[in-house]
Image: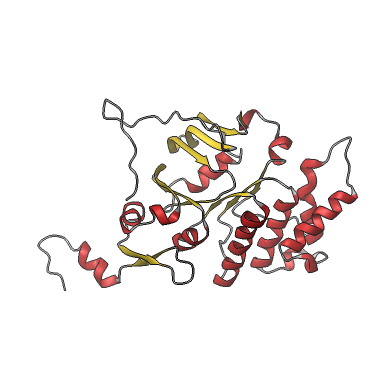
Amino acid sequence: MASKPSTGSDGGPRTNTRRSTVNRLSAENVTLAYDQRVITEQLSVEIPDNSFTVIVGPNACGKSTLLRALSRMLKPSQGRVLLDGQVIQSMPAKKVARTLGLLPQSSIAPDGITVGDLVGRGRYPHQGLLRQWSTEDERIVRESMASTGVAELADRYVDELSGGQRQRVWIAMALAQQTPLLLLDEPTTYLDIQHQIDVLDLCAELHEEQGRTLVAVLHDLNHAARYATHLIALREGSVIAEGAPADIVTAELVEEVFGLRCQVIDDPETGTPLVVPAARKARTTAAAPAGVAKS
């Protein structure tokens, strides 16, 4: 069953004042807003080190907003985001970029740029007056393209590529930053099912084989349950449940978070939770008002 927010002695919500002493990335009691519209209020999360954490929830629940705050793109109006024990907003941008990479939801490449040049831009945080482009940078760019399967595209223009190829190129650029933490905002958006699986398989390899900590926002709960080692379920800006998918993905959680009646079974391929929505007739019958004949 999904966990409920705790309450204080007055019956109101208890403020979570825990502080991460182990994990590198966390948010403490953050209130996040665009203009005057509050998206989340006093939200606290910790990203387990060496995890593949996936944030799920219905549209407009605050998933991408939380990711933007964790990546330093959005400053909390209250509370703080901590990276290695420091308030992330107070850290120099280049220092953050050497620790944390971000793949935004809709990345647009400059016109006329090649794959190799775009991936090379991932080395920018490591450049400076005393350190210019080197053979080490060249090696890292080559390895990043090879590990994402785009090495043969190095001389191609990015705007000539398919959606799946472009997404792999953006991931290669993020890898070239050589950050231990990588944040991805809906990395499978606009991709067909084959390319969605390709991208998620690549993310799993980065986590399992390179030991990187990944945080992703995904819309597909079954994909999240299959690939994540840690799941955070949001609704209306609050954490409803978090933990290993096998521990928290239940029919009750899905109905509470998404308002969807379903069964949760074992995925025949992986053994992870698989959400099977109730048939349309079963859903509409259950939703019929009292006193109305159910056909």
Residue 227: percent from left, percent from top: 53, 59
10 w.r.t. 34: above or below: above
Q: In this view, does 112 lie to the left or right of 22?
A: right
Q: In this view, does 249 lie to the left or right of 283?
A: right
Q: How many labels does the image show?
A: 0
Residue 101: percent from left, percent from top: 67, 46
User: Who's the residue at 69% across and 40% down the image?
Assistant: 99
User: Who's the residue at 46% across and 36% down the image?
Assistant: 44
105 w.r.t. 270: above or below: above
Give the farthest residue toward the bottom.
Answer: 295
Which sits in the foreground, 192 or 135?
135
Give the farthest residue toward the top.
Answer: 10
Residue 175: percent from left, percent from top: 71, 52
Colour mapping: secondary structure
User: Who's the residue at 90% across and 51% down the image?
Assistant: 135
Which sits in the foreground, 54 or 248?
248
User: Who's the residue at 71% across and 62% down the image?
Assistant: 148
Residue 256: percent from left, percent from top: 32, 52
287 w.r.t. 240: above or below: below
Which sits in the foreground, 84 or 33?
84
